[in-house]
Amino acid sequence: MNRRGFLAAGGGALALAGVARFASAAEPTSDEQSNIQLVNDFCAAWPSHDLDKVMAFFADDGAYRMTETTPLADGRDAVSARIQTIINNVDRFEVLESFARGPMVINERVDHFSDFTIKSWHGVGVFFIRDGKIVDWYDYTINMEMA
């Protein structure tokens, strides 16, 4: 099974289990700290509504799954098209907690929207980082508040 298959098949469930163990987790390495900072900077870029700024965080072979029930956007053009559908409605991504293990970063967030069908989305993001870029980003829903 490849990395994307693993994430789709159960990496999100493992990530959720890992969030519960965060309090006893080891301190992140310097590479893990850099990966967490990259994902936090990525989340902070969204309110700019600048697609190029957000896409600068992705590798050329990046992939994005908006929720566990949506199709995978695979490749830079597909990821850009998917992000374009929501970027102008994002007020902010509120990162509640983040941790990393090697190239994987898991964060719990509340994404806040305006002029959109969703008022807020609470979930877990699972990111795979390679060479300072996001290769895979999968989001898993905990709760949504509809507008």
Image: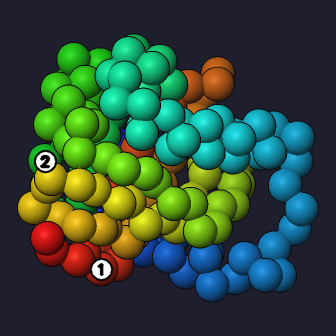
Closer to the camera: disc 1 or disc 2? 1
Side of 59 where 67 appears, left or right: left
Q: Quadrant of the C terminus?
A: bottom left
Residue 40 visible in the shown view: yes
Q: Residue at x 10, y 61 (%)?
A: 117
Q: CA distance from mark 1 to mark 2?
A: 19 Å
18 lies left or right of 86: right
- Whether residue 135 is visible here, answered yes or no, is no
Q: Nearer the viewer, residue 49 or 129?
A: 49
Left or right, 79 with respect to 7, comes to: left
Q: Which mark is residue 143?
A: 1
Q: Amino acid at mark 1?
A: Asn
Query: Does residue 138 sit above or below 37 in this rendering?
Result: below
Q: Quadrant of residue 142?
A: bottom left
Task: Name, please, the residue furthest toward the front.
Answer: 115
What colour-coding does the image apply?
Answer: rainbow
Answer with mark 1 or mark 2, whichever residue precedes in sequence. Answer: 2
| Relative image position of residue 18 (x, y in whole percent) | 61, 75
Say few, some or many: other residues with alpha carbon within 10 Å of mark 1 (under 14 / 14 to 19 / 20 or more). few
User: Which residue is depicted at the point 63% across and 84% down?
Assistant: 20
Residue in the picture at 15% in, 74% down = 146
Residue 48, numbered circle: none
Mark 2: secondary structure: loop
Residue 126: % across, % down: 48, 55
Nearest the camera: 55 or 145? 145
Q: Which residue is mark 2?
A: 71
In which quadrant of the rendered view does residue 47 lie?
top left
